[in-house]
Amino acid sequence: MQQPSSLERPWPRARALTFAVAFAALCAIAPGAAHAQEEPGPRDAHRALQLATSGSLVVTATLGTLVAINQPTLFGDGRCASGDPLLGRYGCSGLSVLHGLSALLATMLYTATVTLEIAEFDWPGRDRHGTLYEVASYGHLVGMALQPIGGIIAAMPQVLGIEDPGFSRVLRTLHIGTGYAIVGTYLVTAAIEF
């Protein structure tokens, strides 16, 4: 009987190694597979909403920062006044609209997240996460209630019959500061819960 050449012979070490890797992979994913068959619950929805809200708040704050750099604030007249705006002409006109749309999405996600927390988890989690969590929770709740109003009035003070450009400058500065506080306190509460 003729022996198979080295190319035709099965490689026992390669087979053993392949089997060992496959077995290790199955052992690693098997515990997760048992949980994968469970129905997604409120905790899963809450985590997904928290992540989406966190990302949306960060994007909105970033866009708001760009708008504040271009527009007059207590820190200066803005880059639009100097003729060198960020993102060119779009930065002086269209960027505020994009920031507003992003803020609308963030507000909707935030509302959905807090509604789920109130309905399912006794928000703000009294006696579960401590005083820092509770203070931060109320901080971002109050901030989110006031922020849309401040943003609209800062962009269009004529709604209230105010023509003074200094009013918008002050309100825009307060608006961006409040935005940073909201993002910071929300991220603190999300980090504590994860």
Image: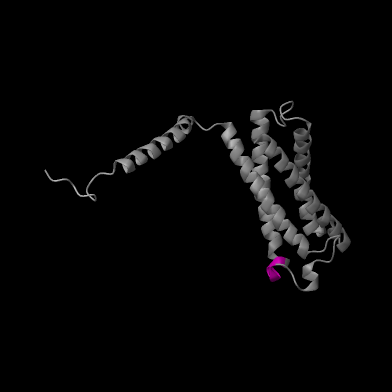
Q: Relative to residue 169, is residue 128 drawn left or right? A: left
Which stretch did the figure color magenta? 87-91
Tell me residue 103's x, y (percent).
69, 51
Q: Relative to residue 186, is residue 39 drawn left or right? A: left
Q: Which residue occupies the extreme bottom position in the image?
A: 83
Please tell me how many numbered marks the rendered image carries.
Answer: 0
When the figure is inspected, residue 156 is found, relative to residue 22, above or below; the finding is: below
When the figure is inspected, residue 127 is found, relative to residue 62, above or below; the finding is: above
- Tell me, yes or no, if residue 159 can be seen here: no
- Tell me, yes or no, if residue 82 can be seen here: yes
Verify whether residue 90 appears in magenta.
Answer: yes
Q: Which residue occupies the extreme left position in the image?
A: 1
Q: Residue at x 74, y 25 (%)?
A: 127
Is 9 or 189 nearer to us in this picture?
Answer: 9
Picture quadrant of residue 14: top left
Q: Residue at x 79, y 35 (%)?
A: 135
Tell me residue 83's x, y (percent).
77, 74
Picture quadrant of residue 166: bottom right
Quadrant location, the C terminus: top right
Verify whether residue 9 appears in magenta.
Answer: no
Q: Residue at x 13, y 46 (%)?
A: 2
Tell me residue 187's x, y (percent).
70, 43
When the figure is inspected, residue 55 is found, relative to residue 32, above or below; the finding is: below
Quadrant location, the N terminus: top left
Colouring method of the image: one colour
Q: Residue at x 74, y 58 (%)?
A: 65
Q: Relative to residue 88, is residue 49 drawn left or right? A: left
Q: Is the magenta region chiefly helix, strand or loop?
A: helix
Picture quadrant of residue 43: top right
Tell me residue 78's x, y (percent).
80, 66
